[in-house]
Image (spheres, coloured by chain):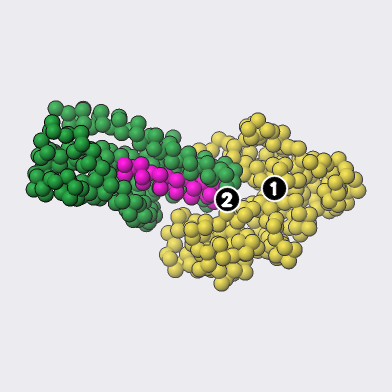
Amino acid sequence: MNETGITLSGLFKSFGGQAVLHGVNLHIARGEQRVILGKSGQGKSVLLKLMVGLLMPDEGSVLVDGQEVTRLSRRGLFSLRRRFGMVFQGGALFDSMTVGENIALALREHTNDSDERVRERVQASLIQVGLEQAYEKMPSELSGGMRKRASLARAIVTQPEYILYDEPTTGLDPISADAINLLIRQLDEELGVTSIVVTHDMASAFKVGRRFALLNEGRIIFEGSSQEAQATTEGPMRQFIDGTSQGPLHAF
Amino acid sequence: MLLARMAAALPSIHRSFREILRQMFIVGNGSLPLVMITSVFTGAVAAVQSAYQMGAYVPVNLLGTVVAKMVFIELGPVLTALVVGARVSSSIAAELGTMRVTEQIDALEMLAIDPVRYLALPRFVACVLMLPVLTIFADLVAVLGAFIVSTFTLDITSKVFTSGLRFLFYAHDIWGGLIKAAVFGGIIAVSGVISGFNTQGGAQGVGSAAMHAVVSSALMVLVADYLLATIIFQVFFGS
């Protein structure tokens, strides 16, 4: 088994008696740009949270670079998470702080950088996501797309090895969604990080992903490169790409 | 569990100094007008009711004594805790509950920042420190309320009332009340934090969390009041 990257083996997870994951097996290699596809409510976000110990599986193993996440103490989990950045679906910016303070928080907590140095690093992150004017703005003053970009700036400011994106384009207009896709692609190339994108937006998936996994009814039912996904002529992956309700995937 | 995690976070409390001050301002300054209004009428009612119950059987110069004992030991700390608890525990639960359902607490976890250290501990410390301060104000204003009612409507001279205040006055009555207030402050914060952290769902979940925080804080304050009365005034200061 590959020791580097993220390996999920036999993952089961239920909420209130309702099973969400039924034995998920998935390996994401270091440096990969992986997209996890699936209909809404299939447990894609749950899968992301399991990777970093925000949720614990009922059964199964989560290995990150050979480290078993399910056995880590809280201190161990915090140490692991410092290697990750995460862009949440709604941005999850702290609404009592300005955008600059949101991004600076991790630096103030985990580094001895001076105020001036923190400000420089925050500003550099904001420039990377095209939000250089937003330092003093409150999250409530930002549009949906700007909020996602600010969330991305917060995720990259600590220079993580892995970036997790939970539905990065959901709720955005096509222009803003494309800008986010380009940004993800650009950050992958510039930072050389491993990125894992959860989405049901196929346009976004083809723009940001090199390998795809399709999650349905708690299991991974397709895994392959974006070219392999594109080459399918039938089956669930093809149905998902075409976005039709007729086929092996049930609409409801 | 929450208390244990807050105790474990105590060594790094200096990192939350500014947040503690901010929370103390929110708890103290925001609650003061409410506490003052409640207390002035509490003192006034205490005077009227005591005068009625004492009637012709107890000398009138003991009215100040009775009111002071009631206020310092019981009414000041408990009513302050109930009023502030309703305001502060619901506010904490709603704020943290909203942070929970909008994934801001998950975001803190992802930044490797312990939400208990960053969110719970400052609120706990602020409540434990500010409840005694608010109780001191409540005690003073309640006695003032009793004094005004006694001198203006009960035909008791100010000299008689104040001599009654000094009669059988023990400093440990006030200390006991303030110790109770500090414990009540902890209860208020813990009720709010637990309800907030465990919020599920959306707006309805936040509403339920706020309601749950108020109810549990009020109930726990009353239960703790009995236990603390037994421990403080019977075991430690009992004759």
Q: Is residue A37 visible?
A: yes
Q: Using the numbered discs, state the Cα–Cα distance from disc 1 to disc 2 in whole angstroms.
A: 30 Å
Do pointers 1 and 2 mark residues of a single chain?
no
Q: Tell me the subunit letter for badge 2.
A: B
Extreme residue toward the bottom, this view: A133
Which residue: 59% across, 65% down? A142
The quadrant where residue B224 appears: top left
Measuring from the top left, give residue A177's x and y in whole percent. Answer: 71, 62
SS at mark 1 in the image:
loop
Quarter in which the C terminus of chain A is drawn: top right
Is-magenta flag for residue B101? yes
Residue type at mark 1?
Ala
Give the green chain's letter.
B
Q: Chain of mark 1?
A: A
Pick the residue in front: A5 or A128.
A128
Q: Nearer the viewer, residue A74 or B116?
A: B116
Q: Position of residue A68 (x, y in %)?
A: 59, 38
Q: Residues within 10 Å of mark 1 (few under 14, many from 20)?
A: some
* Residue positioned 40% across, 44% down in the render: B86
Kind of residue sitting beneath label 2: Thr
**Residue located beneath label 2 in the image:** B102
Which residue is the site of mark 1? Answer: A29
- The image shows residue B195 at horizontal and vertical percentages of 48, 40
